[in-house]
Image (cartoon, rainbow, N blue to C red):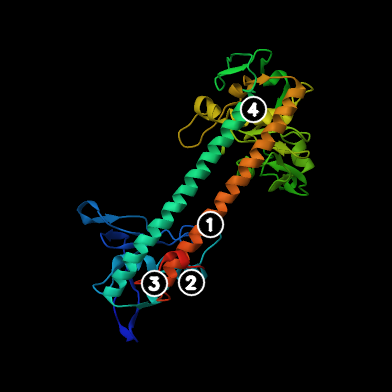
Amino acid sequence: MEAVWPGQRLDTSRRRTKASVATGYTRFQDGDVLVPKITPTFEAGRAVLINGLHRGVGAGSTELHVIRPGALIDPRFLLYVVNTHSFLKKGEAEMYGVAGQRRVPDTFLRDLPVDLPTLEEQRRIADFLDAEVSRIDGLIDVQNRLRGRLFERRATGVMSAVADTERKDRRPSTLAWLETIPVDWQEVRVGLLARMGSGHTPSRSRPEWWTDCRIPWITTGEVKQVRDDRREDLLGTREKISELGLANSAAELHPAGTVVLCRTASAGYSAVMGTVMATSQDFVTWTCGPRLDPYYLLWCLRAMRADLLGRLAMGSTHKTIYVPDLQMLRIPLPSLDEQRKIVKRIREQNAKIDRLSDTVVRQSSLLAERRRALITAAVTGQIDVSTASGRGIEE
């Protein structure tokens, strides 16, 4: 959609305009501002100013509003207008559609009144915001890099713990994902330590198999849960199956403490069943015997995730780890007492890192709020940019 913001009338010292939106294929040129239509990109304030296009023109998704400033509007000022808190909140209120696919209508931009200062004042505001927003974005980048390093430190700590790198008496490992292990540890196929299983989906063509569903059933709908490495136990599932469906399919009931690994969507991610559960065919399970602690196996699987995906997962778009490869999976095996000490060490070191990471996330959120508040205050004339500093602005 292409919108033009012409000056229409004066409102004291500021001009108030409305966007005029014309239908058409989403094409844009240098100087245009692109505003996403769809959630969650719109709410995130992801509007961009187009500059430096090859031949000065381009085309994109129909899920974009294209706003073309007229002669009386500085494009940079317009970009800041559509990133103000008030603009985004008004847009959210006008959205239509179902959850996850809600859109900002064309009429929102067409009918939205905007107060405009003089072109000279717009440029002063844009210059001020360019400098201040750049400073804040730099601080956010620092926080994001710090969070990334904490994430890497967490992963490295898990890998170090499952191999007990503090031990000095070591030997080369035959495992692809470890260089060395303590000399008295074995390297054992998981199938010799735990009973391997899987799951199934009862036929959807038999509605009587899908009534009175009470058995927790792990499916790819648990993506969010299994991808959260702070979570060890799955305590509930979005879907359930019935006793009749279980009896008439290849699904099986697994006891609490069973380790589950996704081998299709979210391949390589794992958890421990917090109660008796069944799974779909997208998962494999291991019910541990007396020599293997399920949480030690869980952290071994998480430590080897990169190897699982890089060496065993097949497919370009949707990765799949095949059961025969998982049947041959091997892990380092210390004594049961050592396994439990390793799990305890992982939990303690992760808790410290997670607290630091949470602090970084809060700081990034506060900086983002400061950024939005500063843009809103400058664009709406709440501050005099010739004397103001963004350091004193609060939302």
Q: Which of 142/337 is in front?
A: 142
Amino acid identity at mark 4: Ala
Looking at the image, which residue is at 31% across and 61% down? 25
Q: Secondary structure at mark 3?
A: helix
Mark 3 crowdedness (10 Å alpha carbons): few <14, some 14-19, many ≥20: many
Residue 267 appearing in the image: no
Looking at the image, which residue is at 78% across and 38% down? 276
Furthest-front residue in this view: 387
Q: Disc 3 marks which residue? A: 379
Report the side of 87 relative to 358 (left or right).
left
Q: Which of 243/227 is in front?
A: 227
- Where is residue 178 shown, x and y percent of the image? 57, 21
Q: Disc 4 marks which residue? A: 161
Q: Quadrant of the N terminus?
A: bottom left
Q: Which of 271/59 is in front?
A: 271
Q: In 3D space, how far apart are the residues under numbered discs 1 and 2 (Cα atoms)?
A: 21 Å
Looking at the image, which residue is at 50% across and 36% down? 318
Q: Disc 2 marks which residue? A: 90
The image quadrant that residue 68 belongs to is: bottom left
